[in-house]
Amino acid sequence: MITFAWILQLIFVPMLSPLCIGIIRKIKAILQNRQGAPIVQPYTDIWKLLHKDEVVSSDASWIFRYAPFVVFGVTILVGASIPLFASFLQNTLTSDLLLIVYSLALGTFFLALAGMDTGSAFGGFASSREMTVSALAEGGFILALLTISLIAGTTNLFAISNAEILHTGKLFLPVVLAFTGFCIVLLAETGRFPFDNPATHLELTMIHEAMILEYSGKRLALMEWAAANKFLIFAALGANLFFPYGIGEHPTIEAITVGIVALMLKTLGFCLGIGIIESSMAKFRFFRLPDLLITSVILSAVAIGLIQIL
Amino acid sequence: MDAKKIAQYISSQKKAKNFDTATVFQVLASEIKEITSDLRDNKHLQLKLITATDEREENGCFKLWYIFAAPTEHVFIVPYIELKNTEEFPSLMSSIEEAGNYERKIQTFFGLTPIGHFDNRPLILHENWPSDLYPLRKDFNWNTKPEESQGTYPFQKVDGEGIYEIPVGPIHAGIIEPGHFRFSVVGEEIMLLEARLGFVHKGVEKIFETVSPHEMIKLSEKISGDSSYSHSLAFSNALEQLSDTVVPKRADHLRVIYAELERLANHFGDIGAIMLDTGFSFGGSHGARLREIIIRMEERLTGSRFLRGVNICGGVTKDISSEEKNNLITDFAIITKDFSELIEIAQDSASLLNRLKGTGVLPYTIAQKQGATGVAAKAVGIAHDARVDFPYAAYGALHFDTVETEQSGDVYARFCVRIKEVYASINLITKALTALPSGPICANTKPIFKKNAIAITLVEGWRGDILYFVTTDSKGKISRVAPRDPSWVNWPLLEQSAPGNIVPDFPLINKSFNLSYTGNDL
């Protein structure tokens, strides 16, 4: 059973992440009174790209060529190392809070390097913007997770998702505050409104899309897929660390099924939220983004303060 | 025309020749600078176009025409100079800044050198075109295929630490026209923007010299696809002036309806696109939807989504039946309600307004100096509109007299001018439909053009005023057609609105102007 659960854990994120993107797009389309593409469209897109030829600039170095593998690999590793549907899959090697945060940062680092590698002006400013945003998002990310780990008394993510105290709903206020801070980071890190517009065709306004502008074919497929994975990773972190209701605690079929359904429902909630945000507001001016990210830091800092008091 | 009122613009020694809407008089090359400055600065006329004609065969000279508009008298004042045995003319750039680009274009296409011009780089034609070949001279055959030449184009440079350049285009990520933009930026802030256009140069002005008048109207429709109707209307008006054709009243009213439909379609599209570019996708999709409703209406009425083939010399080819008339009035009641709801939602969105307000401010003084036109000019409070200043078709009969303006000159102001114009257009259409007189829709006389005549017409397209300058030779054949799209005037303004903004806001600023590349490149 444990082996089965582990296999499921390994393939869960890459298998379901494109679906999340498809669902968000569908929700957005419906909210804009459009019909929209079918929700499996991202799968067919990745499939199509994987069968396409590539164009690689002659100025590109090894960084440009290998970055997609690093970026994609990181999301697979992180996806397997966080609590998804089962908290019994204890793993002390790669499931530490800091390790997860900085593995993701490693992916972002290579993404930014690859953006600059070909010397295109778009990649250059996109990398600069990405670094600005992720440097500011890092504080909020760590503090939000730290709030939870202080409450649970451990930095192992599986242990956090299994912590009794979170299930009981004590310390509800700090959890909600930290969760709000985390949501802001989620939007920033996954390139969503009001930080970035994943649907735009305007090169000059892009962040994530401009970094991967030079990619085509298989490598583009990996980059797109990695971005989708990253979204599901953040959604799962938000769902299972802050509100671990329904997560499978015992290696039984029932527990795993319930865990999967619970995660899917919670992720759907994130998709719905993002769909509504992206349909109902305009993107922020670039220089207003730091304000939002600092808010996220402050929220988590307040949450940590509250733990001491409550 | 009131001869007395016009006389104030022309010094008494000059012998003026009057045409339908224009008064032309010859001046000496040495006087032109003084006379044009006086017309513009003291008499407050607007410079509309400077262009040249090659009349070496008939009169042994090049002529340079300086077209000024006098809106209160509804007339064009046109001093011109003759260049005999010389290929040089005095540049006006030191006194009239906006003359600069016209002169650069004359230099590129006629090989006449403006003396005292600050910028002698060719305009529109690129390095691959031989620099000693001047396509608008009469002795240049339109189907010549010159050998490709080589060269470099020196862009303006900003020096200093931390300045870097972002080259954008000519191929863009969206499905838009080609144009190259060179940004010099510090971090995200734009220091300088230089646009380089000409990628869709088609040689329209030359082709005008080779085709029949009927084909010329078709050609004018192709100058800028989104302004097909306004272009052909301006050109048809010119042909009607040259041939003294009287357009039936019903045709005049139909022309107003079609012209306003074109404005509506484009304003709806732009209002949506401005919202979309801020990421407010709800507004974006509804703008596109409303535009499509109008475009389909145009197709239903005329068989063409862009109202092509509707204008002919003497009237229009498509009528509106009385049944259709009632349908349209009901349709527009629904569209008005639909649009008001959309705008209400947009005006309630703090995040949208935050992006629009204060972005891409065009200073009033620059707009004034560069002779801004259309939406861009109205958004800084310059109340000029060809429909009011030079009433054509049935605009006079319908008593159209309000120019919608805003003051702030930012993206939001241009957004609001469009919203106001949408309501005004719907009003106009309803009014014209109700007042639609019966009768023929086209004059049935065969146009014969006057000899050695000129015609100048101005039509308010949705972007701004479209001007046509048409001349005939001694045989009554059309010898020169010089269209001037509003984009030509407004492109330099876009360059001026960008500095001080951040790079990610540029697409939004660009969209709020929404200028035509093909209309500029001709």
Image (tube, coloured by chain):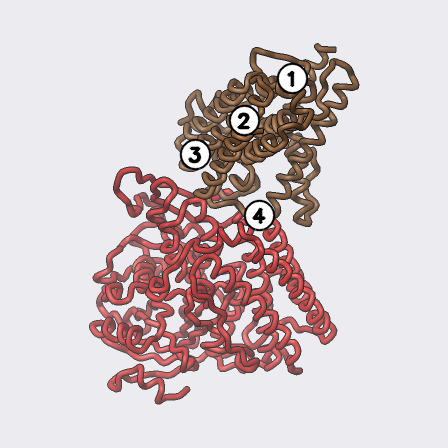
Chain colours: A brown, B red
In the rendered view, tell whether residue A168 sits above or below residue B252. Answer: above
Q: Which residue is mark 1?
A: A10
> Mark 4 vs mark 1: same chain?
yes
**Which residue lies most toward the right here?**
A254
Q: Label 3: few (<14), some or many (≥20) within 10 Å?
A: few
Q: Does the image show residue A221?
A: no
Residue type at mark 3: give it: Thr
The first of marks 2 and 4 along the sequence is 4
- In this rendering, the answer to whether B24 lies above or below B178 is below
* Chain of the residue under label 4: A
State how far apart marks 2 and 1 are (Cα). 37 Å
State the CA–CA distance, disc 2 to disc 4.
37 Å
Name the secondary structure under disc 4: loop
Mark 2 lies on a secondary structure that is: helix
- Residue at numbered disc 4: A281
Which element carries disc 3, helix, strand or loop? helix
Q: CA distance from mark 4 to mark 1?
A: 36 Å
The answer to whether A260 appears left or right of B516 in the picture is right
- The chain carrying label 1 is A
- The 10 Å Cα crowd at callout 1, few under 14, some 14 to 19, many 20 or more, is some
| Nearer-the-camera pick, A161 or B75 | A161
Nearer-the-camera pick, B449 or B124: B124
Q: CA distance from mark 4 to mark 3?
A: 23 Å
Please identify, in this view, whether the residue under mark 2 or under mark 4 is nearer the observer. 2
In which quadrant of the rendered image does the C terminus of chain B lie? Answer: bottom left
For numbered disc 1, what is the local secondary structure?
helix
- Label 2 sits on residue: A308
Spot occupied by residue B476 in the image (x, y as percentages of width and height): 43, 77
Which of the two discs, 4 and 1, labels the residue nearer the N terminus?
Answer: 1
Give the percent coordinates (x, y) of residue B5. 36, 86
